[in-house]
Amino acid sequence: TALDWLYVYPQGMEKISTYVKDRYNNTPMFITENGFAQESSKSSSMNELAYDFKRAEYVAGYLKSLQKAIRNGADMRGYFAWSLLDNFEWVHGYTKRFGLYHIDYATLKRSPKFSVAWYKEF
């Protein structure tokens, strides 16, 4: 991802879900935030920002890992991608884009990225 501290390790989702299942008597779980940061600059084209294949690949990896945990009995009730829309990232401002929808900050127009189409068909 575009952030040094955000590591990609989908297998960790299965491991932690299984750990919580075993340790806490299979309490119901929700993944409330899981996202992929995309680099953005004033020179980034709409095509570069809209075709976020890496985000779809990232989410697919994590969902596949969760699927394994569920098949092994984890009571996973929900998974929420971070974020629906591009947003303000505290230290990085508007330079890191997590959204499934692109926001043109000059006009506030929202446009679906490739990952929206991927999610729809998942």
Image (spheres, rainbow, N blue to C red):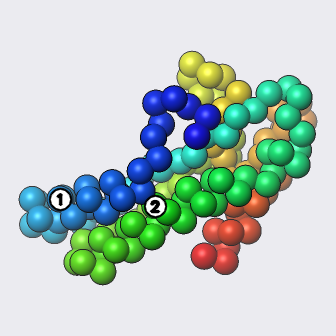
- Tell me which amino acid carries mark 2: Tyr
Residue 32 — which label? none
Q: Camera-side residue: 101 or 12?
A: 12
Q: As drawn, is 69 to the left or to the right of 96? A: left
Q: In the picture, which quadrant includes the C terminus?
A: bottom right
Gap in angstroms between the C-alphas marked 1 and 2: 16 Å
Q: For residue 108, which quarter of the picture?
A: top right
Q: What residue is rendered at 70% in x and 27% in y?
A: 95
Give the percent coordinates (x, y) of residue 103: 79, 41
Q: For the residue labelled by badge 2, is the local secondary structure a helix, a strand or a loop?
A: helix
- Tell me which amino acid carries mark 1: Tyr
Q: What residue is rendered at 85% in x and 34% in y?
A: 44
User: Disc 2 designates what residue?
Assistant: 62
From what the image shows, is residue 39 above or below residue 24? above
Q: Residues within 10 Å of mark 1 (few under 14, many from 20)?
A: some
Q: Can residue 41 be seen in this view?
A: yes
Q: What residue is rendered at 66% in x and 32% in y?
A: 96
